[in-house]
Amino acid sequence: MNNFNKNYTFLIICICFIFSANAQRTITSFDTDWKFIKQDIAQASAANFNDKSWRSLNVPHDWSIEYPFNRANTSGRGGGYVETGIGWYRKSFVLNTTESSQQFFIEFDGVMMNSDVWINGYHLGKRPYGYISFQYELTKHLNFGKDKTNVLAVRADNSLQPASRWYTGSGIYRHVKLISTGTTHIDKWGVFVTTPNISTDKATVHTQIQVLNQSTASNNIVIETSIIAPNGSVVSNNQLKLSIAAAQQKIVDQDLSVTQPQLWSLEKTNQYTAIVTVKAGNKIIDTYKTIFGIRTIQFDAEKGFLLNGNAVKIKGVCLHHDGGAFGSAVPLGVWEKRILALKELGVNGIRTSHNPVAPEFLSLCDQLGMLVMNETFDTWNAKKSSADKGYNLYFTDWWERDTRDQVLRDRNHPSVVIYSIGNEIHDNLNDSTGFRKYKMQQDLVHSLDSTRPVTMALFRPGISRVYENGFAETMDIVGQNYRENELVALHEKKPTLKQIGTENRTEQAAWIPFRDNPYIAGQFLWTGIDYIGESDWPAVVHGSGLLDRTGFARHLGYQRKSWWSNEPMVYTIRKEGNAGAG
């Protein structure tokens, strides 16, 4: 474990110790002791269903990676020729009678896909998008007492294929948490931290806090916010009083000052923690913590991207979410090793292609110093191919909720510097409908997080027309896949437009326009790591990465290091095919 992780763990332990005596919020991992079967069973949602013959396992779990690759599988070349289908998960648990006054929520970081969730036979809801984090309240449907069992049931339906242009995995492939709070508490992802004013001597930390009273009576509360420095010391504190009526939600704002702030940067990833405490009288009824960084970001039409006022060329890579042999249930240590290997090659940015990632992945980017383009969707309404049965089926009904949950969840991560709301979208961007679809998504992101710009990855069809029909002017930043010289031509014609390369080839000709023109904020190579899918049988892996699927640098990676790294380097390929670097 590196020193940062040691200090971070120590800080969290200290925080938990300080507040444990009175805190009403508990977060319990729900990853262990699940029952699983890969088939569809009509009565499996019932609380009294007999699942003793099912397989016992822990999540995160990806059932697709457990099966052999097979050309006959309906996931096809895009999905990597893997087994998909329908699977059921069930988990039994007991709650003490002393907990009956609490509010309970279940939170999934991702279920692939078309998930349905039941508690004790009651249907909580459906979520089509397999990449999104989501939460349901359990409170009214729970049993309390040591002899009363509760049963959580999840159906994951990934049978509609082909559903993606790359490997998705199947099942509960990310973490699950049980959250309990008091009746008056901070809402889901309800603390937003910004740093609107920063100088060498002082930074203003602004907190926007969403409080929810789920009780049947009004409540007079005190909201206290403490800012914890990277070394664990309390450096700022603020209190405000609030009266909140029964079944009411309120948003309150606080400003705090931090003297001599330690800025978050690529080299020094200083992180602060905001601890928001809700008190009724002398009793703590909720605590909520979120980690953030103090830093400034700016995209400029002449200077490109600036971090803390300094021009930084984004040298990024696009990443899909699979971990090679781990499938989509990727241990965090695998991602840490991979990101460190990419940093060694000079990489400082990641585009989450083309979907929300696991929340701990963004925390890792915060810790290791990466600039993240946080992307929402690969498709809107239009298909990418005639056989497409993916998110295009759900966009109209779900884009707003999915975008909202992603931005609310991710907006405190200092590594996130830009949002992308689409990749090579095939919807018509040359008429009012296309303009409206883009604008409604961009406006929603701005309403939830006004501190970061929005782009999308333009490519086809007829993409050159968006430079003439006014579409480019509606974008915060023009994002372009490939066609690097078009960005140069666009700047010459419309120099006030901000630009970034959202997806680029790895050859030198695709790098020079970015290297030689400071107004282009940076680029994201396709790809950082080899990934499963988009391959023609018998191949099942797309081999475009700077790293191979095991996480080791390929020759291409060392070539990129010679262009991107700040250190002089020599790389040789021996005659017998072995290689060495120095």
Image (cartoon, rainbow, N blue to C red):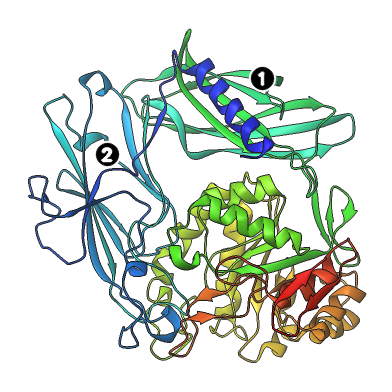
Q: Tag 2's secondary structure?
A: loop
Amino acid type assigned to the residue bearing label 1 in the image = Asn
Pick the front one: 139 or 569: 569
Q: Are marks 1 and 2 in contact (CB under 8 Å)?
A: no
- x 60%, y 46%: residue: 363
- Position of 357 relative to 238 (above/below): below
Write down the residue under mark 1.
Answer: 238
Q: Position of residue 287 (x, y in %)?
A: 50, 25
Sooner in the amino-acid sequence: mark 1 or mark 2: 2
Q: Position of residue 563 (x, y in %)?
A: 85, 72
Quarter assignment of residue 98: top left
Pick the front one: 505 or 333: 333
Q: Position of residue 463 (x, y in %)?
A: 67, 87
Tag nearer the camera, 1 or 2: 2
Looking at this rendering, what residue extends furthest in the front direction? Answer: 576
Looking at this rendering, what residue extends furthest in the top direction? Answer: 282
Left or right of 117? Residue 190 is right
Count of picture labels: 2
Q: Position of residue 178 (x, y in %)?
A: 35, 37
- x 89%, y 29%: residue: 201
In three-dimensional space, the C-alpha distance between marks 1 and 2, rounded to whole angstroms, equals 33 Å
Pick the front one: 506 or 27: 506
Whether residue 479 is visible to the viewer of this picture, yes or no, is no
Amino acid type assigned to the residue bearing label 2 in the image = Leu
Quarter assignment of residue 328: bottom left
Quadrant of the snapshot with the N terminus: top right
Quadrant of the snapshot with the C terminus: bottom right
- x 60%, y 19%: residue: 240
Q: Tag 1's secondary structure?
A: strand
Write down the residue under mark 2.
Answer: 138
